[in-house]
Image (tube, rainbow, N blue to C red):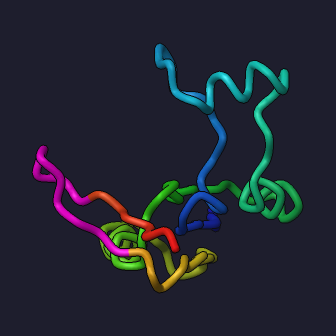
Amino acid sequence: MTRIWTFGDSYTASYAPYPNSNDWRNKYCDWKGYVPKVYGDIISETLGMPLKNLGRGGTDNRCILDSIIDSLNFIKEDDIIIVGWTSHIRFRMVNKHNNFQGVLPST
């Protein structure tokens, strides 16, 4: 079955709460009383196609590209790919846990 893939930053990322977590998404969804939809959810419902949302808040364009590359073996020929690039001033650095972390410089 044809699938929609979305990649991007916080404009793409789902609001779906993290189980057993004190994450801000959980608190926001509790306050709203429902899980708000993002554009990928709306497109998926409108076209009647399953969605694979790989958006992540706070990410930079290199991490978005890495996410696309990591998914290439799973994307099928007729799948739809939507990429939401972020600001060009965002970049990534390695944190003390040896993981990439997005940085958005403030002005």
Q: Is residue 71 left or right of residue 36?
A: left
| Residue at the limit of the structure toward the top, as seen here | 20
Q: Is residue 53 above or below residue 5?
A: above
Give the percent coordinates (x, y) of residue 66: 32, 73
Q: Quadrant of residue 48?
A: bottom right
Residue visible at 62% across and 32% down in the picture = 25
In the rendered view, does 85 fall on the left or right side of 30? left
Q: In the picture, residue 46 is in which quadrant?
A: bottom right
Given residues 81 and 61, the one toward you in this image is: 61
Whether the magenta-drawn stretch holds residue 99 is answered as: yes
Asked if 73 appears above or below 33 in the picture, the reply is: below
Side of 92 where 41 appears, left or right: right
Extreme residue toward the right, this view:
46
Nearer to me, 11 or 87: 87
Q: Between 34 and 73, which is closer to the camera in this rendering?
A: 34
Q: Is residue 61 left or right of residue 77?
A: left
Q: Residue at x 74, y 19 (%)?
A: 30
Does any portion of residue 81 appear in the rendered image?
A: no
Q: Position of residue 11 (x, y in %)?
A: 66, 62
Q: Report if residue 61 lies within the magenta region.
A: no
Percent coordinates x, y for residue 17 in the rendering? 60, 29
Residue positioned 79% across, 47% down in the render: 37
Task: Say which quadrant the N terminus sits in.
Answer: bottom right
What is the span of residues highlighted in magenta in the rendered image?
91-100
Outermost residue, bottom side: 88
Q: Is residue 1 visible?
A: yes
Q: Position of residue 87 (x, y in %)?
A: 54, 80
- At 34% from the left and 74% from the top, the residue drawn is 91
Number of labels in the image equals: 0
